[in-house]
Image: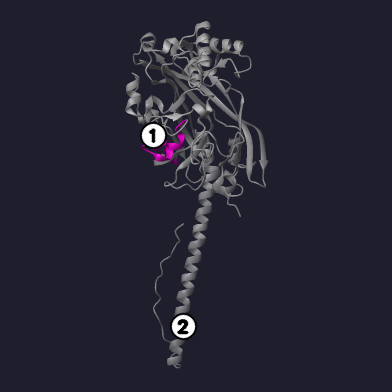
Amino acid sequence: MASYHDQDVALVPGTTAYDGFEEMAVPMRMQYWVWDILNPDDFLMGDKPIMEQKGPYTYLEYRNKLNITHDHDEGTVSFRGRTNYQFVPEESVGLESDTFWTVNVPVFTVANLLKDQPGPIKNIQRLIHELSNATSVLELSVYDVIWGYEDAYLLLFDELFPGQIPTTIFGLFAGTNYTAGKPWVLKTGEKDIKDVGQVVSWNGLTELDFWGTEWANMINGTDASTTAPFKKSSEDVYVFVGTICRSGYLTYQRENELEGLKTGRYQVPFELFANATINPDNIGFCYPDENNCHPTGMINAEPCQSGAPVFFSLPHFLYGDPLLLEGVIGMEPNEEEHILSFDVEMLTGIVFAVSNRIQVNLKVQSYNTVPDTRFLRTTYVPMVWLNESSIIDAESAEFFKSSIILPLLIARIAVGLLIGIGGVMIIAGIIGYCCLCKDEKKVEKKPIEMQGSYNKGETNHVYEKE
C-alpha cells in the first residue's frame, strides 16, 4: 500500500506534486547577459575579440503543460511544455532595444554546412554573401539576438533556393516564446515511486542518433523539474536536456537550507564538460567522429542545431580549457556566480531551487567562401549567457512543511513508536518466559519451597533504527 508520501509526489491528479506539474505557481526568472565585441574591425583582421558582458536583461518565465495525457496502465504521462516570457525592465540594465556587436550566426552556419561541398556549390555562398552585403560581425539588439529578426542573408538564400530553408527568421531562442515545445513522456511514479519524472521518450525518441556511442545517445534521467524521492547524497541527479540533445548529471556537494527546509545542493561536475582525453565516456560526443573532439569545457550542439557550429559551456568558460580563455579577452570565471546547481529536498526529490546557467558560443574560423573571414583565427566566441532560476518562497515552504513534512514526520514517529513498543513487549515477554522457566526449575528441585523470590532486572527499551 502506498504511503502518504508516495501518493503526494506522484505525477497524477490529486497530488500536491501534480498541481505544480501542470502549471508552475511561481514564475521562474530568465536573465540574459549579452557579450559585446568591443573591437569588431580588429577582430576581423585577426585580433582576439575583446568581450564585455551587458546584463542582466530579465524576463519572468511562466510555464504550463499542454495536451496532458495519462496512461495509468503504463504509469506514464505525455505532454508538451509551453513557456511565456515577459520582459521586466525594472530588473534589467536597459531595454530590449539595446544594441551590441556579435558574430553573424547565419553566415557561419551556411559556411559550416558547405565547407565539405564541391567548389561550385561553395561558390553559391560567396555570391549570396556579396549580394546581401552581409558581414561576419554585425550590430543587433538584445531582442533580435534572443527572439529573432528577419535576416537579409537568409532572405536572399530563400529567394534563390525557395523552400530549402525552414525560415528566414534567426534568433538564438526564436520560436520558443508562447509556443508548444517537443512532446515528452515521463513516468508518473504510480507504479514505482522511485521512477517519478523519469523520461520515457522525448520528441518520439527513446534514444538519440546524433552521437557516436550507445552511452552518449541514451535518454536518461528526469526533465529536471523533479527527481526521485528518498535521495541519498551518494546518488547523482540525472537529467535530460532537449536543447543540447544529451543527458547529463549533477553531483551532491553539501547540505543546504532554504526557508527552514533542509536540501541537498547538487552541482554540474567538471567531468561532464571534460574532453574525451580526460573523461573517456565523452568520446561519443566527438562530432562528426572521434577525430573531431572539442576542447574541455564545451558541449557540442551542432548536430541538433541544424548544423550551426554552436557550442554550450558554463558562463565565462568556467571549467574550460585554458586555450578557450586565451582565445578571447574579458572572461572572468567564478564558480559561485557561474556554476549550474539544483537544491533538492531529499525525502520528496522536489527541486526547491535551481540556477540553470549556460553560455551560448559560436565556433568561428576562416572560410574561403566568406571574404571578410580570411584573417580570422579559429575561436569560440561567446554570444550570450543566461541564468534560468527559481527558489521556493516562504508561503510555499510553509505549505510544504504543514502538508507534507509534518504528516510524514508524524507517520515516521508513529511507526517508530510502534516498533519501539513492539520491541519492549517482545523483550518483556522473553524476560517473563525466562523467569517462568527459572521458577519452574525451582519448583522441580524444591517442591515444598514455593515462596522463593528473585530480583527484577531493569530492561533497556530498544528501538529499531529506520
| Image position, residue 405 (x, y; %) | 51, 45
Instruction: Residue type at mark 1: give it.
Output: Asn
Quadrant of res 330: top left
Residue that carries the numbered disc 1 in the rendered image: 275
Report whether residue 141 is seen: yes
Task: Please say whether residue 41 is one of the residues in the magenta stretch.
Answer: no
| Image position, residue 465 (x, y; %) | 44, 58
Q: Report the residue at 45% width, 27% height from top.
A: 312
| Image position, residue 387 (x, y; %) | 46, 26
- Nearer the camera: disc 2 or disc 1: 1
Q: Report the residue at 44% width, 39% height from top.
A: 250
| Image position, residue 399 (x, y; %) | 54, 39
In the picture shown, does residue 454 fall above or below 318? below
- In the picture, the quarter occupied by the N terminus is bottom right
Q: Determine whether, in the image, residue 189 is placed left or right of residue 465.
A: right
Residue that carries the numbered disc 2 in the rendered image: 437
Say how the picture is coloured: one colour
Instruction: Residue type at mark 2: give it.
Output: Cys
Alpha-carbon span between mark 2 and mark 1: 73 Å
Nearest to the observer: residue 12 or residue 446: 12
Callout 2: SS: helix
In the picture shown, does residue 206 fall above or below 368? below
Callout count: 2
Q: Which residues are magenta?
A: 261-287
Callout 1: SS: loop
Please rate how many residues cluster around mark 1, counting C-alpha atoms within 10 Å: few if below 14, some from 14 to 19, many from 20: many
Task: Please say whether residue 265 is one of the residues in the magenta stretch.
Answer: yes
Quadrant of res 15: top right
Please rate how many residues cluster around mark 2, counting C-alpha atoms within 10 Å: few if below 14, some from 14 to 19, many from 20: few
Q: Determine whether, in the image, residue 203 is placed left or right of residue 234.
A: right
